[in-house]
Image (cartoon, rainbow, N blue to C red):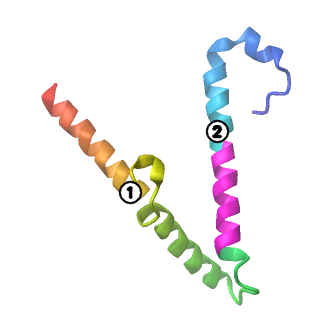
Amino acid sequence: MVITNPSFFLSAPEIMPLAVCACHDVASTISANGLYKTEVIRRRASWRTVDEVEIETLKWVDWFNHRRLLETIGNIPPAEAEEAFYANLTTLDMVA
């Protein structure tokens, strides 16, 4: 859904957080896609097969999720942060 009329938000304020969230999701996706194209696709002059692209894509996604360190979450990989988050939820459930 694309909202082009700003008065929409005034008439339905309860929808605004969802719309803002969706915009951030789109921006994140575009950013990650640009990073992927720059780091993987354009780095090589040519690709011989689709399989080559798929394999390199899988390698990049693995690096992006499991080895890339993010300063904003304590210089740990996203997968490690996610694992700690869910472990903490489990611990909180046991306490309750």
Could you tell me residue 59's position as x and y percent?
51, 75
Q: Earlier in the sequence, mark 2 or mark 1?
A: 2
Q: Is residue 16 magenta?
A: no
Q: What span is in magenta?
A: 26-39
Q: Quick one: 5 or 63, which is closer to the camera?
A: 63
Q: Residue furthest right?
A: 5
Q: Residues within 10 Å of mark 1 (few under 14, many from 20)?
A: some
36 over 9 or under it: above or below: below
Q: Residue at x 54, y 71 (%)?
A: 60
Q: Residue at x 29, y 48 (%)?
A: 84
Q: Is residue 34 magenta?
A: yes
Q: Residue at x 46, y 53 (%)?
A: 71
Could you tell me residue 72's position as x and y percent?
47, 47
Q: Secondary structure at mark 2?
A: helix
Q: Quick one: 71 or 37, which is closer to the camera?
A: 71
Q: What label does residue 76 carry, if any?
A: 1
Residue on which disc 2 sits: 24
